[in-house]
């Protein structure tokens, strides 16, 4: 073998070993998904709560949890792929927070566009996760999120949020629970 082939084989082994050792911390996904689902439920059942303050409180709780988790895991040895995965989800959630609050408060984005845009962001995050972890099921979830995003644009605005809540349950919370259980048994 040439030096280049040896180097490529070495890099391939590192990537394969990283994927094998990579555990997906799905607890933050569960927290964000559950808080969003609570928000959807409250918006549809308690009319007085339908407003920006409900979402500000729920998203603040999610970010406080995220900050606490980051502080708790700081200093722990992590694979490069785990750092990239965490950074990807952090970037997606940051972007969604900015779009959700700044986009709507500025009037640049109508509130009815937020659920399909968020669904598209989840598709992006799941595809990046699939590439990093080598888990093909995540590719399917990414595609499902993108199909859901496209369909959400055609759902009547009064139902868009509740349909998004259903997507959250089926495409985020249930898979995150499955990932959490599989990580706990390993």
Image (cartoon, rainbow, N blue to C red):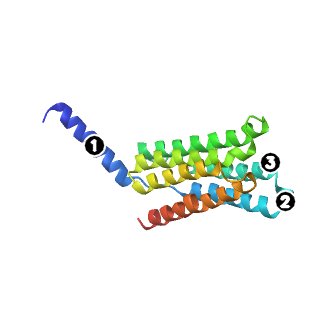
* Mark 2–mark 1 distance (CA, rounded to whole Å): 55 Å
Quadrant assignment for the N terminus: top left
Distance (Cα) linking label 3 and label 1: 48 Å
Of the pair 96 and 120, the residue shown nearer to us: 120
Q: How far apart are marks 3 and 2 (CA)?
A: 13 Å
**Which residue is found at the position 48% from the left and 45% from the top?**
85
* Residue 8 x %, y %: 24, 37
Give x and y (percent) for residue 139: 44, 52
Q: What element carries label 1?
A: helix
Q: Which of 164 and 23 is in front in this view?
A: 164
User: Do the CB atoms of the residues marked 3 and 2 lie less than 8 Å apart?
Assistant: no
Q: Is mark 3 on a helix, strand or loop?
A: helix
Q: Is mark 2 on a helix, strand or loop?
A: helix
**Which residue is tagged 1?**
12
- Return the disc, 2 or 1, that comes first in the chain's sequence: 1
Residue 126: tell me if it is visible.
yes
User: Which residue is pictured at 84% across the width and 59% down the height?
Assistant: 47
Q: Position of residue 10 (x, y in %)?
A: 25, 40
Does residue 67 appear in this view?
no
Q: Residue at x 14, y 32 (%)?
A: 2
Q: Nearer the viewer, mark 3 or mark 1?
A: 3
**Image location of residue 73, percent across then percent down:** 54, 50
Question: 105 above or below 61?
Answer: above
Q: Which of 93 and 18 is in front in this view?
A: 93
Residue marked by disc 2: 47
């Amino acid at each position: 073998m040439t030096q280049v082939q040896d180097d490529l084989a070495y890099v391939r082994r590192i990537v394969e070993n990283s994927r094998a050792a990579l555990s997906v911390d799905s607890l933050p996904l569960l927290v964000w998904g559950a808080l969003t689902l609570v928000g959807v439920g409250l918006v549809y059942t308690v009319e007085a709560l339908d407003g920006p303050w409900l979402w500000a409180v729920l998203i603040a709780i999610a970010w406080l949890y995220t900050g606490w988790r980051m502080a708790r895991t700081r200093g722990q040895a992590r694979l490069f792929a785990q750092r990239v995965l965490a950074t990807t989800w952090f970037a997606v959630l940051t972007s969604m927070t900015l779009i959700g609050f700044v986009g709507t408060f500025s009037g640049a984005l109508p509130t009815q566009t937020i659920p399909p845009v968020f669904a598209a962001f989840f598709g992006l995050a799941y595809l990046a996760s699939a590439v990093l972890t080598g888990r093909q099921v995540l590719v399917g979830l990414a595609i499902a999120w993108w199909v859901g995003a496209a369909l959400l644009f055609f759902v009547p605005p009064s139902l868009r949020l509740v349909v998004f809540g259903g997507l959250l349950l089926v495409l985020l919370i249930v898979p995150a629970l499955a990932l959490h259980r599989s990580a706990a048994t390993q």
